[in-house]
Image (cartoon, rainbow, N blue to C red):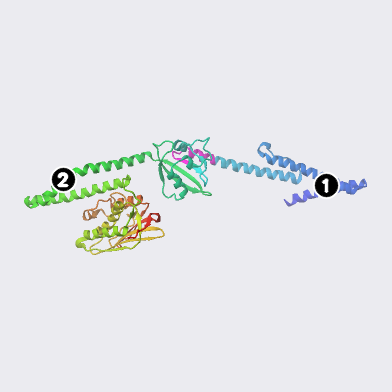
Amino acid sequence: MQPKWSKHLYYTLAGLAGTTLAGLYLGYPLYGLIAGLGLYLLWTLHQTRRLAKWLAEPEIAGEAPQSLGLWGDLFERLHKLNQNNLQIRDRLRARIDRIQESTNSMRDGVIMTDAQGAMEWWNGSAEHLLGFRRNTDQGQYIYNLIRTPAFKSYFDARDYREPLELNSPAKPHIHLQIEISLFGDDDRLIVAKDVTRLHQLELMRRDFVSNVSHEMRTPLTVISGYLETLVDNADDLPAKWQRAIKTMATQALRMETLIADLILLSRIETGEQEDTNTPTDINTLIGQICQDARTLSGDRQHEILVNATASKMLKGDESQLRSAFSNLVFNAVKYTPAQGRITVSWYTDADGGHLSVKDTGAGIDQVHIPRLTERFYRADPSRHKDTGGTGLGLAIVKHVLINHDGHLEIRSKPGKGSEFVCHFPAERLVEAHPG
């Protein structure tokens, strides 16, 4: 670049020297220098005008203007930069078109919005699932088109760890699962999945479990009643029948317990519950449950300690909370060796309320912990006959906590016991009324 600058400077000075000598020849050297500078300025302005005109519409103008010296070199370099930029733009446009084409082929609806929720782009599936219109909805706020308070709260909460399920605003028979991801400057990428079939299957499963449980309850109650009568009069029966009848009575009782848990779980899942905003005295509730646990412990003589001194009450359905807490405490009794220690604590802090059930039992391997709240899942199936459990206790606990905006934390190590902690948000705590 330096040689070209030198060459351009050389030609410029030579031109000015020539006009000055011509003026000197005519007796006016200063006029000659001024004339040379004026010509150079006019030529520079002409080249600047050509450059501005070309830069205004380089694609329409095509090739860069031709010129000499420094201006020619400048036009050439700008032309190369423009060509490179056009190539990069074409490659980016091709990639964007390919991404949009592939996104349009998805069955899931995909929507991009800015941080405020103004819609910038969406694919064809979003139009089908949510009823968006390409010509009129561009730039509209998405929560004005999906008019569901739950969606607006979910969008504003910025906590997208769990998806949101709702019915399509355009086609109510379609059940959608909404997932939101943050990107860029708090922009949103929203994915809407059609989970109608899964939703219907889940409803069918719940209805089936509920109906079958209710239908089995009556005949099983009759059978249990007759078996109880036979057990009470077992001394009048032949010896070979006594053991069989007692075994049948035990299994009938287990079936009744299982059906009762299935019905309870079905009611909790389907929302058949009382108002979950009634203040509940957890201290009193825990005391009652622990008294029942001592009775359950019986000759095994567990040491059951209660640490419930929190002054605040919990807004919730007392019957559901009793079911959840009693499941945790009774499980601790069942799975803790004789004379073991069980500690039940209720405390509050800035994060909310926490109920802890800690035992000195055998503990649970980390492999099993993620699945413990599944229906009928057992970390140790061999203990089924010993404990007499139904495998639904922790599933009931999980759904009760979901209904109360809480979650279950499980801490356990083999040989070092287990601790189950129910966490409730601070919004559910209320001050206890005196008296």
Disc 1 secondary structure class: helix
Residue 127 versus residue 299 in the image, above or below: above
Res 330 visible: yes
Which amino acid, mark 1? Leu
Residue 103 sits inside the magenta stretch: yes
Residue 310 versus residue 103 in the image, above or below: below
Residue 312 sits inside the magenta stretch: no
Front position in the image: 435 or 355: 435
Give coordinates of residue 366: x percent, y percent. 34, 57
User: Magenta region: which residues?
Assistant: 96-110
Give coordinates of residue 243: x percent, y percent. 12, 52
Which amino acid, mark 2? Ile
Q: Is residue 229 left or right of residue 413?
A: left
Query: Is tag 1's residue or tag 2's residue first in the polypeptide sequence?
Result: 1
Give coordinates of residue 42: x percent, y percent. 80, 43
Q: Mark 1 points at which residue?
A: 37
Q: Secondary structure of the magenta portion, mostly?
A: helix
- Residue shown at the point (67%, 39%) measured from the top left: 58
Residue 332 versus residue 129 in the image, above or below: below
Q: Report crowding for label 1: few under 14, some 14 to 19, many 20 or more residues within 10 A (C-alpha).
A: some
Return the mark for residue 223. Answer: 2
Label 1 vs label 2, nearer the camera? 2
Disc 2 secondary structure class: helix
Spatial separation of the CA atoms under disc 1 and disc 2: 118 Å
Give coordinates of residue 115: x percent, y percent. 52, 47
Res 414 visible: no
